[in-house]
Image: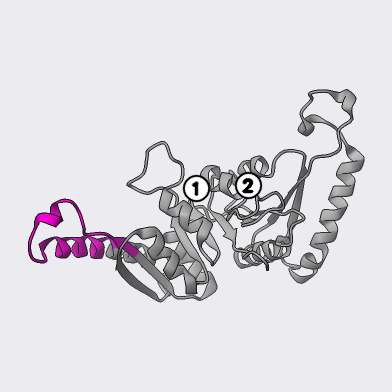
Amino acid sequence: MRWAAREAARRKALLRIVHAFDWEWASARYGTGREYVELAEQRAESVLQEALDQGRQAAPTVPIETNAVIGNPAPQLLQIAEDAALIVLGSRGHGGFASLLLGSVSQRVATHARCPAVVVRGRGDVTNGPIAVGVDDSEAAEQVLGTAFDAAAARGCTLTVVRTFLPPIPLWIGDIPPVLVATPEADAEEQARLDALLAPWKQKYTQVPVETIVSHNSAAAVLVGVSHGAQLVVVGSRGRHTIAGALLGSTGMQLLHHADCPVLIVRTPAGE
């Protein structure tokens, strides 16, 4: 809630707080009148009031409206996200398995929403450190970079750009992991490609300091590591290795479960 309020303040946007609830409990089916419906409505209003108070404390000048809807949370939130600029979710629900790192509602909405989605997890209230972004050779790279540069500029912080690749490994090396193999020429070529990709963005956002990381490790592993010192990690919804028809690449999914800071999924519809 506090993260969403601060983001709405940065964007000068309306903040809409939504709480979906279901009053059709087993005990309610045998009752009469509106007793159970009224109880559910009272609980929903209590949840919304607490959220509203937190939102106003975090961003006193942001216009806020509240909305209680009856029904399953995931489809209700997906419908509301149809005309939203951004949807913000928590990382854990109160009705899931304790061992799960991401609630089922947040996972479904983050992977299916038509608009960009943020899952606030790990150090959710962190407001310092760089923005981290992972980029590859997919068509979505420019959109992801644009979102990341915008976020860094709005926060006045450094942007850390992560690019990973698997260099060609000589057969005689054997079972040595690629991350431990020294390939200076291949690394230099990959760094040059990344610098060329970033050049126009650096010219546009001259106020944003940029750091780069080129690694042989997996993108998810590097970004999860960087997330321990970042305030936000930005990734695309479809990487170059995403299985056809998948709604979120493996890197994004691993970050939703393991990142130590909020994660922003940049929505890139299929065909665009």
Residue found 73% across the figure and 59% down from its top: 209
Instruction: Evaluate whether residue 3 shows in this view.
Output: no
Mark 2 packing: few (<14 Cα in 10 Å), some, or many (20+)? many
x and y, in percent, of residue 242 in the image: 66, 50
Sequence-wise, the earlier of marks 1 and 2 is 1
46 relative position to 210: left or right: left
Could you tell me which secondary element the residue under label 2 belongs to? helix
The residue identified by callout 2 is 251
Magenta residues span 19-47
Q: What is the quadrant of the C terminus in the image? A: bottom right
Residue found 30% across the figure and 64% down from its top: 48
Q: Nearer the viewer, residue 109 or 180?
A: 109
Could you tell me which secondary element the residue under label 1 belongs to? loop
What colouring style does the render use? one colour
The residue identified by callout 1 is 123
Mark 1 packing: few (<14 Cα in 10 Å), some, or many (20+)? some
202 relative position to 82: left or right: right
- Quadrant of the image occupied by residue 19: bottom left
Up-down: is 230 above or below 175? below
x and y, in percent, of residue 267 in the image: 59, 63
x and y, in percent, of residue 152 in the image: 64, 62
Q: What is the quadrant of the N terminus in the image? A: bottom left
Say if the magenta span includes residue 7.
no
